[in-house]
Amino acid sequence: MALALTKGLGPVSIKNLIAHCGGVEEVLNANDSKLLRTPGIGRRTVEILRKQIDKGRAEKELEFCQRKGIKILSYLDKAYPKALKYIHDAPLVMFQRGELKLNDFVGIAIVGTRRATPYGKELARKFADFFSAQGINVISGLAYGIDICAHKAVLSSGGKTTAVLAHGLDSIYPWSHASQAARIIEQGALLTEYFTGTKPDAPHFPARNRIISGMSRAVVVIEAGESGGALITARYAFDQNREVYAIPGRLGDPFSVGCNALIRDNLAKLVSSPEEVLQDLEISWSHHSKKVSQLSLFEKVPPNLNDLELKIINVLNNGEELIDQLSIKTGIPFSRLSASLLALEFKGIIRQMPGKRYRRMM
């Protein structure tokens, strides 16, 4: 928590340091020479570690969370959303209210414009209600419009839903959704990467959207204009190798522009029903309520891999990578990385592409 609170340190740099040094305490106790041997870490980062770590602020946050029953999910914890770990800038620490075990359910995000039409709201309710009946965790952002319609539908059906927030858990934004937030705590989870006192400032919302997509198996866009948060979430999902689905709309309708553009640009698949989404995801479904087992792509890890090899394929889940980027993102020195890459090639799990790029094959 102290590392996550330190200005000038991002989650990628911190995770590289932890991987290279062997743990959080090891990072804080390492000498300058060892820190500087970490890929991507320079003298400026070391100076920040030496001068700006504030354990006192972290202790106050810990005390507040304990008083309010807020769970602290470290990137190293088993309870941390597994799917989220596969994005390169996953938060180092997450905060949760609610007892939902996030790794026990398939997550599908439903997003869209805040100024939804009656048609869009009805579609959001239809999709959310169907997913909920199949035991799916419906994920959204508690915003006006499509988001809150999806949450409400799940709450009404007694299902599981997660709201990812762009501020600290000591407040709710928008305040008009506080009653729904209280019900979400009972039936699902409120989740955020932001510490106590963090306000819902504009830059936090796009950052929040990478979490909505990152912890989801797929993202469904109901209505979207030519710009806005729903399109940002969809593009994050596409870059994170998640499935993206969009509901087509009539030409000329302002909130059909975004969905139609996603389909036109091959960033999203066209769907007209929630059944089509589950069929494309190869998730069995029925008209009766049942829990969907968590058989996502992220659990399909080949057996008999060592820790270094697991780190490599976890990064390659997000797409091809240059060898130098692999070294930075995994924290594995080049001298050991080359041998691990060769071993994975022999096992048929990855393939070297032109330009020293690597791709996961299975």
Image (tube, rainbow, N blue to C red):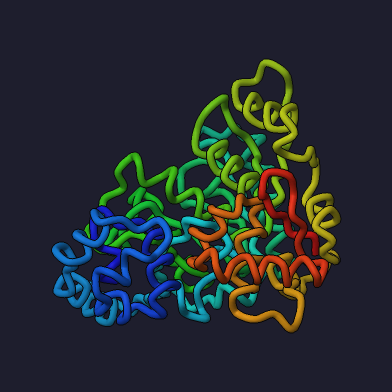
Residue depicted at 64% across the width and 63% down the height = 107
Residue 230 drawn above or below residue 199: above
Q: Residue 292 versus residue 10: which sits nearer the camera? A: 10
Residue 112 position, x and y percent, is: 57, 40
Q: Residue 177 versus residue 62: which sits nearer the camera? A: 62
Residue 201 position, x and y percent, is: 30, 43
Residue 196 falls in image quadrant: bottom left
Residue 205 position, x and y percent, is: 41, 45
Residue 160 position, x and y percent, is: 59, 68
Residue depicted at 36% across the width and 48% down the height = 174
Q: Is residue 122 left or right of residue 230?
A: right
Residue depicted at 66% across the width and 49% down the height = 356
Residue 135 seen anywhere in this rendered image of the structure: yes
Q: Residue 192 versus residue 332: which sits nearer the camera? A: 332
Residue 167 falls in image quadrant: bottom left
Q: Is residue 347 left or right of residue 231?
A: right
